[in-house]
Image: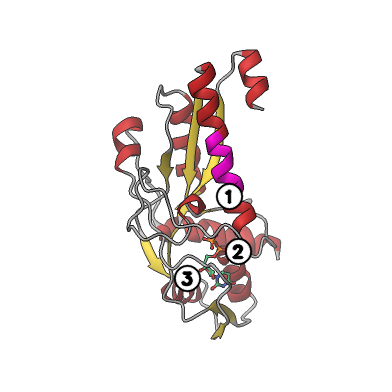
Amino acid sequence: MLELARRAGAKILQTSTSEVYGDPKIHPQIESYWGNVNPIGVRSCYDEGKRAAETLMIDYYRQYNIDIKIARIFNTYGPRMALNDGRVVSNFIIQALKNEPLYVYGNGSQTRAFCFVSDIVDALILLMNNKYNLPINLGTPDEHTILDFAKYIIELTNSKSEIIYKELPSDDPMQREPDISLAKEKLNWEPKVSLEEGLLKTIQYFKERI
Ligand code: UDP
C-alpha cells in the first residue's frame, strides 16, 4: 500500500493502535513513549505487526517524503461493531441484555478508556486534512476499571446479570489511557460523546439485533 501511495502521490493513513504501547509503564500514554511489548506472547502478532507497520510508514516518509498519517487508536466502540468480536463492550452488552453472567477477566482492576466511534471518525477526517505526519493518539482520557465498566453496563441495561471472574488472558495490559494533548493541539479535537450517551446508543443497536 505504501508503494502504491508513493506511485500515485496519495496520502496514506495507518490505523495503528494503543497496543503499540503494550503493557505500558508510563501512564497515561504519550506518543513519545516506546512501549513495553512482549515480542513472543499471544498478542505479539498484532502488537508487533502494528509496530512494524509504523516503521514502514515512517521509512517511506523519510525516504520518499510521502504524506503519511499514523493514528494510534485506543479502545473504540459504537453501533455497527461486530456482535461476536469477543471484546469487552460487545460481550458485556450481549450478556447483560440476555441476563446471563458477565465474565470479568482477572480481578477487573485493569483499566481501559472507551471512545465513541463518531468521535474517532471526526478525528480521522481532521487528521487526513492536516499536515502532521507523526503518530498521534486518538481516544478518550476517560479511564475505567473493567469491573466498574461491567457494573455500569448492568445498570444501563437494567439487567439481572451477575458478575463472574475468569482467568486473565496472558499479556493483558493492566492500564491504558491516552494522553490526547497532541491531538488537541494539532487537530483542535477532543471527544464530545459521553460514555453514557455512547453506551445507550450501542445498547439500542445490540437490542435490535439479538
Ligand atoms: N475483558 C473481560 N471480559 C470480556 C472481554 C474482555 O473482562 O468478556 C477484559 C480484557 O481482559 C481486557 C479488557 O476487558 O482487560 C478489554 O478487552 P478487549 O478485548 O475489549 O480490548 P483490549 O484488551 O484490546 O483493550
Amino acid carrying label 3: it is Leu
Give the mark toward the camera: 3 or 2.
2
Magenta stretch holds residue 53: yes
**Where residue 191 sits: x, y (%)?**
38, 45
Distance from label 3 to label 1 (Cα)? 36 Å
Sequence-first disc among 3 and 2 = 2
Image height check: is 14 above or below 66? below
Residue designated by label 3: 156
Amino acid carrying label 1: it is Glu
Q: Nearer the viewer, residue 170 or 123?
A: 170
Residue at the spot x=53%, y=78% of the render?
104
**Where residue 209 sits: x, y (%)?**
70, 61
Q: Examine the image and state in which quarter residue 186 appears.
A: top left
User: 10 Å neighbourhood of mark 3: few (<14), some, or many (≥20)?
Assistant: some
Span shown in magenta = 48-55
Q: Nearer the viewer, residue 204 or 117?
A: 117
Q: Nearer the viewer, residue 187 or 116?
A: 187
- Ligand 1 is located in which of the four quadrants? bottom right
In which quadrant will I find the N terminus?
A: top right
Sequence-first disc among 3 and 1 = 1
Sequence-first disc among 1 and 2 = 2
Q: Is residue 67 visible?
A: no
Residue designated by label 2: 41
Residue designated by label 1: 48
**Where residue 54 sits: x, y (%)?**
53, 38
Label 3: which secondary element? helix
Prevailing secondary structure class for the magenta stretch in the rendered image: helix
Amino acid carrying label 2: it is Gly
